[in-house]
Amino acid sequence: MQFEGRGDPVLALDKVDLALPAGAFGAIIGPSGCGKSTLLRLVADIMQPKSGNIRIGGEAPREARRANGIGFVFQQPTLLPWKTVLQNVALPLSIAGRAAAARAVASPQQLVELVGLAGFEQALPGTLSGGMQQRAAIARALVLRPEILLLDEPFGALDEITRQRMNLELLRIWAEARATALLVTHSIAEAVFMADVIFVMSPRPGRITDTIEVPLPRPRALALMRTRPFFETVNRVRDALFGREAAEEVGEPAAGW
Amino acid sequence: MKRSLLAFGPPLILVILALTVWEGAKRLGGLPVFIPGPAQIWAELAGSPSLFFGNLWPTVTTAATGYGVAAVITVIGAAISAMLPPLRTPIYGLSITINAVPIIAKAPLLALWLGTGPSMHVIIVALTCQFPLLVGTLQGLGAADPRQREMLHSLSASPWQLLWHLRLPASLPYLFAGFRIAAPLAVLGAVTAEWAGANSGLGAMMLYALFSYDIAKVWLSVLACCLLSALAYGLWAVVERRIVTWDDGLDR
């Protein structure tokens, strides 16, 4: 799987070149307004680029979207409040029709269980916590077995503790679903913990300034966050984001951690 | 079920208390001649029920017909203005203009123009209750969350699926708010139309009783109008509660 984009009418994105191998977990990190959500929306064919080229497993975003090859998890859960959890998870099936539904490997019920919402199938979203709603949204994004799972700061609205837990859950779900994943985040630790490869973006116009491989083994556990390779990668991403500033102000780069 | 029955308790006690105080005040001579006690009004109803119900029924049918006509026209109008945005302002403007003319001024004008037949009554009802119906439907059709529209777009939903899965259900809370507020206005419209000229109906009964100083009958017809309005409102509230079972984020 590979995509690259060039230019935009307002030049929100410029010279964005990135490629993500199939089955990998990529993370896009950058400050607010650098166009990382825009980039994700271009991949999902929610927005269309004025120029540039994006390929998802060889297909253009529009074809991939029409073939239900894209699962999108938004910043907000965007569940339909009048449908139960199970109905929300099954929504892509009822929209795609029978032919696509036949291709789905896991049933909505199985996905509800996969994201840990067993027992809440008949609950309305309004009665669930934000974390539980976002889990249902992830299950919904997975129900048609998409080739690529696009996650736009999915846990940005959650507190730090819930967020850690959800990240672990997401890695487990991603490993089971065997999809390619692309996560937009503005948390350095989150990007390093989750991804195989991190794309660092800078704003005005949005561009990719660095691509950093994460040398951490899988499956990942919270204990990894105390290891030296983790901190070294965090520091590399920080250097890429802030340039020389990051090292100068503290004096020593945090080599003693 | 038990809880909803319990909810009727406090208002019921309040009504009984108010009626008791009212009747007591009347019996002790605390009220002037032109305010009858509840017992007198009840006697008026019990004495000639056929007269009362003979006048109640035309008002009910007029109000319901006019309300139905207004509902159909405004829903179509709102749908047109949602599909063709340039028409939104003229349609909305017309509705505001009609609503701005006081009903008490509209009724005699229409009576002069259309005569005092049932069609005039129905038209006045429709004109009286159209505004909240249109506003509710218009707001409802625009109520779908843009983020949810994006979500359905990413699922490649067709326009019909978008309507069925998102726009329609998202519109219901606003639609019901408009329909609920418009229901008592339909009763107001019917009574005003009957004032402007009618042989039967609560409005006609009220007017004739007023001219013949039949105080108890005036009060009976006024109370009947109040009950009818409250009933129409309550009916929609019940239907709404049955259908809109989710938390729509609207305060009420």
Image (tube, coloured by chain):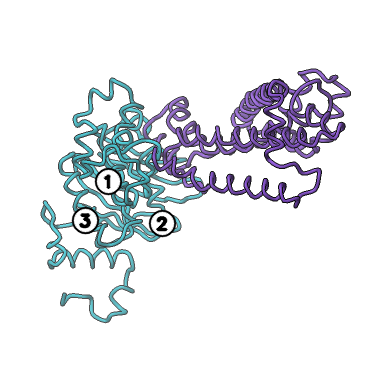
Chain colours: A cyan, B purple
Query: Is B111 situated above or below B172?
Result: above
> Which dot marks residue A135?
1
Residue assigned mark 2: A34
Q: Position of residue A85 (x, y in %)?
A: 30, 38
Q: Amino acid at mark 2?
A: Cys
Residue under pointer 3: A165
Left or right position of B135 against A185? right
Let me know if marks 2 and 1 both belong to one chain: yes
Foreground: B126 or A34?
B126
**SS state under label 3:** helix
Of residues B103 and B99, which is closer to you in this image? B103
Residue at x 76%, y 27% (from the top left corner)? B124
| Host chain of mark 2 | A
CA distance for labels 3 and 2? 27 Å
Q: Which mark is residue A207?
A: none
Q: Is residue A222 above or below residue B70?
A: below
Residue placed most toward the observer, B25 or A256 = B25
Q: Position of residue B238 (x, y in %)?
A: 50, 34
Q: Amino acid at mark 3?
A: Arg
* Chain bearing mark 1: A
- Residue at the location (55% across, 33% down)? B236
Q: Is residue A45 left or right of residue A192?
A: right
Circle nearer the N terminus (1, 3)? 1
What distance separates the C-alpha of mark 2 from that of mark 1? 27 Å
